[in-house]
Image (cartoon, rainbow, N blue to C red):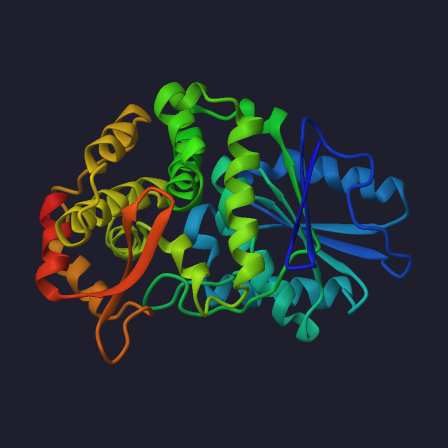
Amino acid sequence: MERLKVAGVTEVLVEAGLPSRLLPDRSDRSRAAILTQPAARPRAVEISDRLVATGIATEVIGLPDRDEAKTLAVAESVYESLARFGLSRHDTVIGVGGGAVTDLAGYVAGTWLRGVEVVHFPTTLLAAVDASIGGKTGVNLAGKNLVGVFWHPTRVVVDTELLEALPTWLLREGFSEAYKAGLIGDRALCDLVTARGLGAPLQEVVTRAATVKVNIVNEDEREHGKRAYLNLGHTIGHAIEFASSLSHGASVAVGMVAAVRISSEVLGFSESETVISTLGLLGLPVDATDMDSARVRDLLRHDKKRDEVGLRMVLLESIEAPVVRHVTGDEIEIGLAAVGL
């Protein structure tokens, strides 16, 4: 079992199967509300049954699929369920599912009664290596994750046996974020993914990718500096995701293509072809043709990373050497053109 620690708050457990103790030890916890989506409901019910057997009252609260769960309206309905259930400051919110579940569960926990404990059981590779770790929570409004709080889970439990049984398309989603982690902080992870593709061992992939994120968050919890490196591929990727039907991992893959093409042009990044071919090897999209390019550009104009100088993007000088810099309109167009926009 691998055990990591985030910001002195979150214990990340990576192992095959569920641990014997699902929640951190606390004597004052009497209830747990379990938020989940349809595909993850069997795991949520399993966790509920085990907690009930230990004397903790539970309620399983169903959420809509994908980002339909990440709205203020859904959050409001969850608050109403928590009120009926009687969830107190001493109790726990549990997120069981993918990144949308962990985002919403964290947001609800961070705002219910001004903050209660949250524990995540990610059931997708994407959530395991990225969304469940680091305390960023949020819901969508006019753009991606525009409403949210920083609220760290006390524990994240990653079951590699569950991840190994995922369908190929969900593995691709997670490998997009795992490969991103390698690009910003672990060349050995990049080399592993390039050599093995989706056949790379998940225990190593998850542990390496999570370690990159843990190390960055431990240095910069509130994104005043290095934590922004985790946004590689997300600036243009989030705009593509919000403007289309592409999934998060697929959109970030396209965003990474745009980012490495800009990096090649303005910073002399020499490995853009390797990055793009690796994304293709994973079965991820490397362009965004047949999309509303005007909508993507409008979303970029309203990106939360834009300031009075302009839009900030994460680029690469080399693998393991990310930088955050303002990009000009012409440089953005280089990236958009590289992905067919």
**Quadrant housing residue 248:** top left
- Residue placed at 52% from the left, 22% from the top? 201
Q: Position of residue 304 (x, y in %)?
A: 33, 70
Q: Position of residue 6 (x, y in %)?
A: 63, 54
- Residue placed at 23% from the left, 28% from the top? 277
Q: Position of residue 95 (x, y in %)?
A: 62, 50
Q: Where 129 sits versus 9, above or below? A: above
Q: Position of residue 18 (x, y in %)?
A: 73, 32
Q: In the image, 153: left or right of 101?
A: right
- Quick one: 282 or 47, which is closer to the camera? 282
Q: In the image, 277: left or right of 225?
A: left
- Quick one: 86 or 185, which is closer to the camera? 185
- Quick one: 269 or 217, which is closer to the camera? 269
Residue 233 seen: yes
Residue 135 seen: no
Q: Where 49 sits versus 132, above or below? A: above
- Residue placed at 44% from the left, 47% from the top? 66
**Quadrant housing residue 142:** bottom left
Assign the N terminus to one quadrant of the image: top right
Q: In the image, 46: left or right of 304?
A: right
